[in-house]
Image: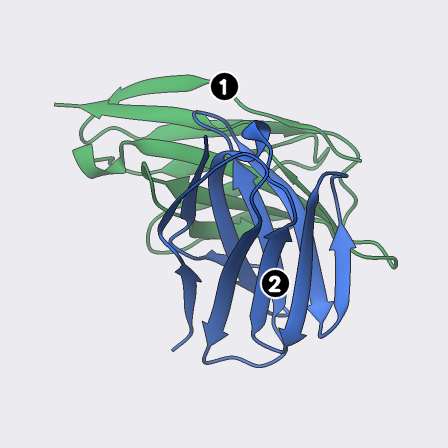
Chain colours: A green, B blue
């Protein structure tokens, strides 16, 4: 079963790009990596999902290198409202039922 | 559009009392459903997931159980709560794309 680890915390300033890395092992070619954002006392909110190379949407990018031992969530030009905890999730596809492993979470603090 | 509801929002229960948390999803059919627990300041722990009515997979052995009596209804139960059952309980659903969408959560305090 994949084990996912993330930095405990990161600090940034408004307008900067933030990259949060999730380390994982045993990720097969078609297994997915998903990232979520969570504010206090709220349910996590889906940000982005991918299984290879690079995915970009209107709020973030996800990079998965060829060795698939890590993935990076990139948030361009963060603002104060991006202060939150960010979780990666590895979805291991198996015939007997998918296995889900959430990372430990990264507290991002954005300052002026 | 799809929405997910959880209730109650907060709950305070004594040790040894029963528990029933309900989750319902609107606007989709045959969703995968999940129950997670989050201890204070900690990450997400998957408790149960379901791919269909009556189909429940347990990820962590404990005194909790789950049921799915209808396609879009997921219930988390306990016969006797423990202090360690306190936490933030989250229900989520996903479709074929594996993206999970979470409900607002239930804050459970066992006293």
Place residue A110 in its image quadrant.
top left
Q: Which is nearer the eye, A99 or A15?
A: A99
Residue at the image position 52 percent from the left and 31 percent from the top: B43
Which residue is at 58% across, 81% downward?
A: B29
Other residues around mark 2 within 10 Å, as few (<14) / some (14–19) / many (≥20):
many
Q: Circle 1 marks a residue in which chain?
A: A
Q: Residue at x 58, y 28 (%)?
A: B84
How many C-alpha atoms fall within 10 Å of the one at disc 1: few (<14), some, or many (≥20)? Answer: some
Q: Nearer the viewer, residue A106 or B15?
A: B15
**Quadrant where the N terminus of chain B lies?**
bottom left
Q: Percent x, y for residue B91?
A: 52, 55
* Direction from residue B49 to residue B25 in the image, left or right: left
Q: Note whether A109 is above or below A43 in the view shown.
A: above
Q: Are marks 1 and 2 in contact (CB under 8 Å)?
A: no
Q: Which secondary structure lies at badge 2?
A: strand
Pointers 1 and 2 within a single chain: no
Out of B4 and A37, give the one closest to the viewer.
B4
Q: Is residue B96 left or right of residue A13?
A: right
Question: Relative to B87, does residue B55 appear above or below in the rendering?
Answer: below
**What is the residue that sits farthest to the right in this orientation?**
A96
Q: Which label is found at residue A56?
A: none
Query: Which chain letter goes with mark 2?
Result: B
Task: Residue A96: give x, y in percent of width and height.
Answer: 87, 57
Q: Secondary structure at mark 1?
A: loop
Label 1 belongs to which residue? Answer: A7
Q: CA distance from mark 1 to mark 2?
A: 29 Å
Residue indicated by mark 2: B33
Residue B77 locus on image (x, y percent) = 61, 54
Q: Can the viewer see residue A44 in this picture?
A: no
Residue drawn at x 54%, y 56% is B20
């Amino acid at each position: 079963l994949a084990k996912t680890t993330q930095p405990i915390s990161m600090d940034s300033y408004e307008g900067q790009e933030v990259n949060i890395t999730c380390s994982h092992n045993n990720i097969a070619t078609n297994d997915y990596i998903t990232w979520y954002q969570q504010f206090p006392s709220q349910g996590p909110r889906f940000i982005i999902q991918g299984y290879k190379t690079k995915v970009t949407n209107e709020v973030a990018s996800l990079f998965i290198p060829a060795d698939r031992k890590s993935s990076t969530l990139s948030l361009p030009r963060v603002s104060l409202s991006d202060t939150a905890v960010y979780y990666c999730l590895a979805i291991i596809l198996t015939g007997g039922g998918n296995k889900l492993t959430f990372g430990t979470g990264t507290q991002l603090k954005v300052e002026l | 559009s799809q929405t997910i509801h959880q209730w109650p929002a907060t709950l305070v229960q004594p040790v040894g009392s029963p528990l029933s948390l309900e989750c319902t999803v609107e606007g989709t059919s045959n969703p995968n459903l999940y129950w997670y627990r989050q201890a204070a300041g900690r990450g997400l722990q998957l408790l149960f997931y379901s791919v269909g009515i009556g189909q429940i997979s347990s990820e962590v052995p404990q005194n909790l159980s789950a049921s799915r009596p209808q396609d879009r209804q997921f219930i988390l139960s306990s016969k006797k709560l423990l202090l360690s059952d306190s936490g933030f309980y989250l229900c989520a659903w996903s479709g074929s794309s594996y993206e999970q969408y979470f409900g607002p959560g239930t804050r459970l305090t066992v006293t």
